[in-house]
Image (cartoon, helix red, strand yellow):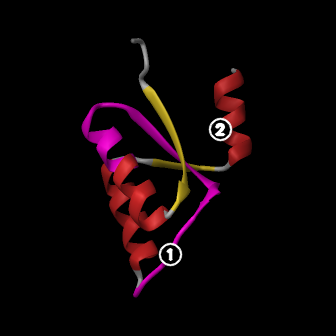
């Protein structure tokens, strides 16, 4: 279908957003998590762990402004 890039936001960053982002990477998409378009629950360090896992998988963390710049370009 010509889709190769995913922009992800929502609740909760350390669970649902993380799982969607990691699944997207596994499926070969370029994945961007829009940091100011999500919020974490952060149970016992779960948010820091989620950031680490997403970074290791190649997820790019960007702002909504940067996401708009990328999609308009």
Identify which residue is drawn at 42% across, 12% down. Answer: 2
Q: Quadrant of residue 51?
A: bottom left
Vertical placement of 2 versus 57: above or below?
above
Residue 68 x/y as whole percent: 71, 34
SS assignment at label 2: helix
Residue extent of the magenta highlight = 21-44
Residues at discs 1 and 2 in contact (Cβ within 8 Å):
no
Vertical placement of 71 versus 2: above or below?
below
Q: Is residue 26 left or right of residue 34?
A: left
**Pointer 1 or 2: first along the chain:** 1
For residue 67, the mark is 2
Q: Quadrant of residue 35?
A: bottom right
SS assignment at label 1: loop
Residue 16 x/y as whole percent: 41, 58
Badge 2 density bin: few <14, some 14–19, many ≥20, Cα 10 Å: some
Residue 58 x/y as whole percent: 37, 47
Instruction: Tell me how far mark 1 sits from mark 2, CA to CA.
Output: 23 Å
Identify which residue is drawn at 49% across, 62% down. Answer: 13
For residue 41, the mark is 1
């Amino acid at each position: 279908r010509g889709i190769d890039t995913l922009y992800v936001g929502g609740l909760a960053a350390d669970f649902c957003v993380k799982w969607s982002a990691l699944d997207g990477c596994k499926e070969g998409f370029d994945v961007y998590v829009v940091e100011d378009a999500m919020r974490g629950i952060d149970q016992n360090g779960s948010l820091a762990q989620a950031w680490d896992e997403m970074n290791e998988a190649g997820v790019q963390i960007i702002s909504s402004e940067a996401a708009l710049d990328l999609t308009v370009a």
